[in-house]
Amino acid sequence: MNENYTFEQKLTIAKGRKGTIAVGTCMILFSIFTNIYLLFYAIELNAYLIFKHAFRVLATIGILTALYQGKEWAKYLLLLIVSLAFIYACVLMFRDTNIVFKILMSPAIFIYGIAIYFFSFSPNFKAFFKDQNKK
């Protein structure tokens, strides 16, 4: 962190760092939980299904790591993916009658909605991201 920042700016950057870690951790944990749930309750468990879910978790971790490092492309890619997941979860929530999917989609809508807000509009994240880009 640059020493020329005021106390308020340092505080905002620190809040952005903590928020980025918190939102990213929630996204990763939710992804892992969902994958474990789907693997245990999948009708047909095969190598393709396991690879697909493992790739999704690793891609999420990679994109969040790049975002934490201040990569501009990671911010836009994550917002695109999270927005599509949010829309997909909303559609499944109201279209599907299966209660299991509704239970899985409720936290997805919540977590992805918070991620969209935080990475798009949060002044704390903007300050943290700007500070990361200066390094």
Image: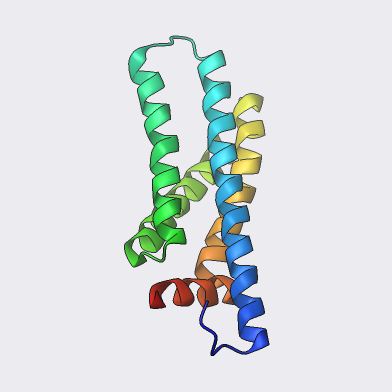
Q: Residue 123 in the image: x percent, y percent?
A: 58, 77
Q: Residue 11 sits in which quadrant?
A: bottom right
Q: Is residue 135 left or right of 98 when viewed as pictured?
A: left
Q: Is residue 52 shown above or below 121? A: above
Q: Nearer the viewer, residue 19 or 31?
A: 19
Q: Is residue 6 left or right of 92 when viewed as pictured?
A: right
Q: Point out the image quarter for the C terminus.
A: bottom left
Q: Residue 34 in the image: x percent, y percent?
A: 56, 30
Q: Residue 104 sits in which quadrant?
A: top right
Q: Residue 52 in the image: x percent, y percent?
A: 37, 27
Q: Is residue 108 shown above or below 100? A: below
Q: Residue 15 in the image: x percent, y percent?
A: 65, 69
Q: Nearer the viewer, residue 95 or 7?
A: 7
Residue 135 seen: yes
Q: Residue 54 sits in which quadrant?
A: top left
Q: Nearer the viewer, residue 81 or 84?
A: 81
